[in-house]
Amino acid sequence: MPEANETDYCFRVDKETLKYVLAQSAKRPLPPATPRTLELPLDTRKVVTLVGIRRSGKTYLLFETMRRLEAQGVDRRQMLYLNFEDDRLLPIQIGELDLILRAHEELYPEVAGRKKFLFFDEVQNVPSWETYLRRLHDTEEAGLFVTGSSSHLLSRELATGLRGRSVSFEVFPLSFAEFLKFRGLEHEPYSRTSESRMAAALEEYLKTGGLPEVVLAEESLRPRILKEYVDLVFYRDLVERYGVANPQLMRRLLRHCLGHPASLFNVHKLYQDFRSQGLALSKDTLYNYVGYLEESFVVFTLPVAERSLRKQAVNSKKLHAIDWALAYPFVAEPSIDVGKKLETAVFLRWRRQREDLGYLAGDREVDLVVNREHPEQLINVAYSVSQSQAWEREIAALEDAGARFPQAARVLVAHEHTKRKPSAGIQMIDAWRYLLGEPQGGKKG
């Protein structure tokens, strides 16, 4: 066996480095944050995992959980927070993870016998992290909370490595209700002034998107933040993580997907379009790259609402981005159809709750079907139905769908609408009310 040289040791994470990082973390005040709708369980015996796109708020959910523990009387020294994107911890290896608890016990012997709460941020950067967490879960009296930015990594390795020991939560950008909290706004029932304020806030939400950092930034800084953010996702979460061999193709695909929210998407047609533009690619590569975008929480592809898997496979899928503002570095904001943004917002409202979503294809398309095998709700979304043509198109599609699925509720969600009454069985509701979960404000025929 060759002898280790000095270079082999200069990058190792040692106990003293861990003590420095842990002490700094314990002394640092928790940053202020607006509470999110999602609240993590404090007393589960499972490993609590948070997955989602970068900067959707996973780290601040960890901080908020630590704040709640403090409010219950837990000593801050019982909490270990480590961010595995901290350069002082890289490249940490599986054999060095044991040093974490040893360093903590030496640093804080006065709390050595108390229950510990471990918060590991961006844990996917540690090789074989799931093996270490499994052992901690089985041998230590500890609360375990971890975050990661890759659904592919976490879903695969949680299933094989933690074997039923985990409970997972998806973290999305801000919902409209959370956006209002960040803006310090609250709906006052039975107030016309408040209703107008909610409608105006929705217009701002559809322009700004829901990424917390972007929402809180000054308007002049938002384009720069979004560009840097998209570049980070492209290079770190796509090109580097998946070893993308054709970055030019991946960037063109990313631009196409983000720039066409709530549009129909067919890999075969896109393959032909890219080939006609002179790009060298195979169809398998394109399928793989689309998969990478989905696994990294950048986009969702919505299948047609058919029980037949064959029909789901041959029909185009509907494309939704995790946040429409991610398109702005590629496409000017005014050029993106605001109705498509609203449709994506409605889709995300449901996707936060469940995954069995689809759409109805055909000349009279229905934008969203809740429970694609046994439809429970049929939803059409339009920014404006004040013009007769738009009104008749949306209502006719819901009427046709209702004849096919009479047991399903039918809803038309619109921001600007007419005083006309929809046909029997169709509920029309203001978009801001729907996104806030206030269906009682709608008008039903």
Image (spheres, grey):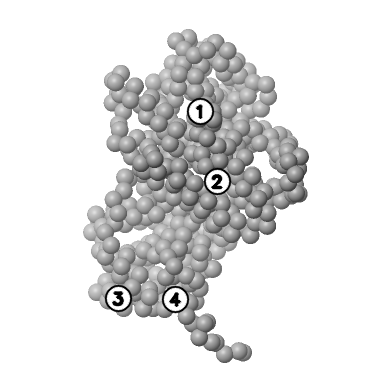
Q: Of the residues under marks 2 and 4, which one precedes in the sequence?
A: 4
Disc nearest the viewer among 2 and 1: 1
Residue 372 image-quadrant placement:
top right
Labelled disc at residue 13: 4
Disc nearest the viewer among 3 and 4: 4
Instruction: Give the spatial CA distance, label 1 vs label 3.
Output: 54 Å
Figure quadrant of the N terminus:
bottom right
Query: Image check: 69 left or right of 400?
Result: left
Circle 1: is it few (<14), some (14-19), or many (20+) Cα within 10 Å?
some
Residue 222 image-quadrant placement:
top left
Residue tagged 3: 107
Residue tagged 2: 298
Q: Where is residue 194 drawn, in percent x and y? A: 30, 24
Question: Label 2 sits on what residue type?
Answer: Val
Instruction: Give the spatial CA distance, label 4 vs label 1.
Output: 49 Å
Question: Label 4 sits on what residue type?
Answer: Val
Q: How many labels does the image show?
A: 4
Disc nearest the viewer among 2 and 3: 2
The residue positioned 39% from the left and 46% from the top of the image is: 213
- Secondary structure of residue under mark 1: helix
The residue positioned 34% from the left and 35% from the top of the image is: 180
Residue tagged 1: 338
- Secondary structure of residue under mark 2: loop
Work out whether 391 lies above or below 357: above
Q: Where is residue 334 drawn, in percent x and y? A: 50, 30
The foreground one among 299 and 282 is 282
Q: Of the residues under marks 3 and 4, which one precedes in the sequence?
A: 4
Q: Of the residues under marks 2 and 1, which one precedes in the sequence?
A: 2
Question: Label 1 sits on what residue type?
Answer: Val
Circle 2: is it few (<14), some (14-19), or many (20+) Cα within 10 Å?
many
Instruction: Give the spatial CA distance, label 3 vs label 4.
Output: 16 Å
- Secondary structure of residue under mark 3: helix
